[in-house]
Image (cartoon, grey):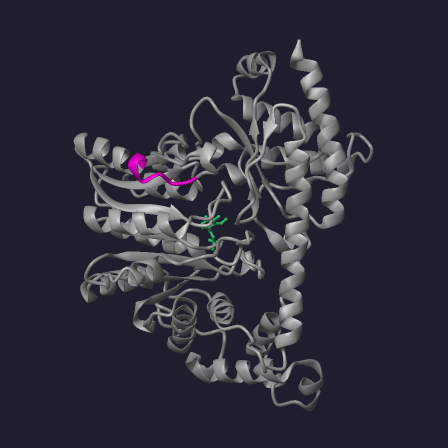
Amino acid sequence: MSYNKTPSITAETINQKVRIFTYEPCGEIVRHARRLEKEIYENPGSLPFQEIIYCNLGNPQALGQRPINFFREVLSLCDNPSLIDRDEARALFSQCALKRARKIIESLPGRDSGCYTSSQGVRSLREAVADGIAARDGFPSKADNIFLTDGASSAINMMMQILIRSHEDGILCPLPEYPLYSASIVLHGGTMVPYNLTEDSGWMLEIFEVKRCLEEARASGLTIRAMVVINPGNPTGQVLSITNQEEIVEFCRKEGLVILADEVYQENVYTENKRFNSFKKVARSLGYDHNDLSIVSFHSVSMGYYGECGRRGGYMEICGFGDDVIDEIYKLASLTICPNIAGQILISLVMDPPKLGDQSFEVFTDEKEEVYSSLLKRAKALQKAFSSLEGVSCNKFEGAMYLFPRLRLPQAAIKAAQLDGVSPDVFYAHRLLGATGIAVVPGSGFHPVSGTSHIRCTILPGVEKVAAMVPRLQAFHEAFMDEFRG
Ligand SMILES: Cc1ncc(COP(=O)(O)O)c(C=O)c1O
């Protein structure tokens, strides 16, 4: 019997939508960093550095950030409920962790953390999230409108699946963008409609620019379904002013657009004169309710002071959709049966952490403050270092976890990049990695305005690592500029 030995599945014959998108935070620069790491391990001393410093991804605990004790206590008790009533447990765990774990276990199906749950997430945990949102915003929130998810990414993907019907459906997204959005839109067969943030005004979102993009897209035959807003911004680190948020709410209401509010950095705001305001709160404060405007807010356990990104926990709050749509979202969620339980528990703890008067409160507050103060110290040191480099200007660090310095490289460096067939930021980032072991993401991975070059640097390695990194960065940059200045 003869059979065809040529594989029918090749990169050319798979779903081409998968091949089109790129996701630079985990892209070529990181693959190269891993190769160099292997080289260091196999041939110690063969490279001019002893370790790779990963500044490519917001992965706090991989870079030394310690988890919050209360969260871990509750998680471990939920996984080992038999510990709760043992005498030793009272010495090992705080009273409020024991109490919280008991309450959570009572509400799990089969009173165990290994069961499938409702596809929307355990009701009591959704109630904790809804209560947390209500306390944060001062406006009511309902557990029925909350979907617990495996991180914000899965929620964002789910909403793209719900909103996009064909390539004639457009989604407005900021540029520079977090590349999950373009990837998800491509995968689900829609069209991304980019709007530019303005670098010269601290990466602010100008509503006339969004309007221009909306009108152009409509004129080309697209139906615009939603507007993505990332606040605080990634990679750009800006925090929107309340006036700006009000403009966005008015605009989306008038144009009939869903606001997809990416609020995963809501606990990463560092400026004195700005604070995080959810889009739902802004809309409700303007007097708009669920009949006036649809808003989906995404949050996550990955960032903030908790940094539990490997746990894959998050929620989306869906406002202004009918029950029929909620039912369809439920059906979609049920394709993966349920979000993982550790992530569900964690997001409930993030939204309902220890309060004043709880036994864990003081330790919890100290741990949280330590994370913030270390983050701020590192951000200041790195911001100062980038700003001191010739031809580099660095954005003000208002929120999120990244710096996005702009590079103005000599013509000779731009030519050398062209000869290598890469963009100048990719050229620079590879040279930086090869000379220092510092892995940053080339800014082109976030699709900024063409003709500009940036790198995104995560502010995550410890204070000592940043102190060690700064002179290496400065020495590299000086040598780079000398080489190409001509
Ligand atoms: C703006 C933004 N949205 C969403 C995500 C995804 O978060 P999660 O880990 O919860 O999937 C990230 C992660 O870096 C992000 O930066």
The answer to whether 57 appears left or right of 316 in the picture is right
Q: Position of residue 70 (x, y in %)?
A: 61, 73
Magenta run includes residue 94: no
Question: Could you tell me residue 126's position as x and y percent?
Answer: 39, 72
Q: Which residues are magenta?
A: 204-209
**Along the line of sight, the residue nearer the viewer: 357 or 77:** 357
Task: Name the quadrant containing residue 212.
Answer: top left
**Which residue is located at x 59 percent, y 20 percent?**
409
Point 71% across, 50% down: residue: 462
The N terminus sits in image quarter: top left
In the rendered structure, the answer to whether residue 371 lies left or right of residue 209 reads right
User: Is residue 380 something that shows in the picture?
Assistant: yes
Look at the picture and state if 298 lies above or below 81: above
Q: Is residue 178 above or below residue 20?
A: below
* Residue 39 position within the rendered picture, expressed as x and y whole percent measured from the top left: 73, 34
Hey, which residue is sitting farthest right in the picture? Answer: 45
On the question of residue 192 being in view, the answer is no
Is 413 left or right of 476, judged from the image as shown?
A: left
Quadrant in which residue 276 is drawn: bottom left
Q: Is residue 206 magenta?
A: yes
Q: Closer to the camera, 451 or 385?
A: 385
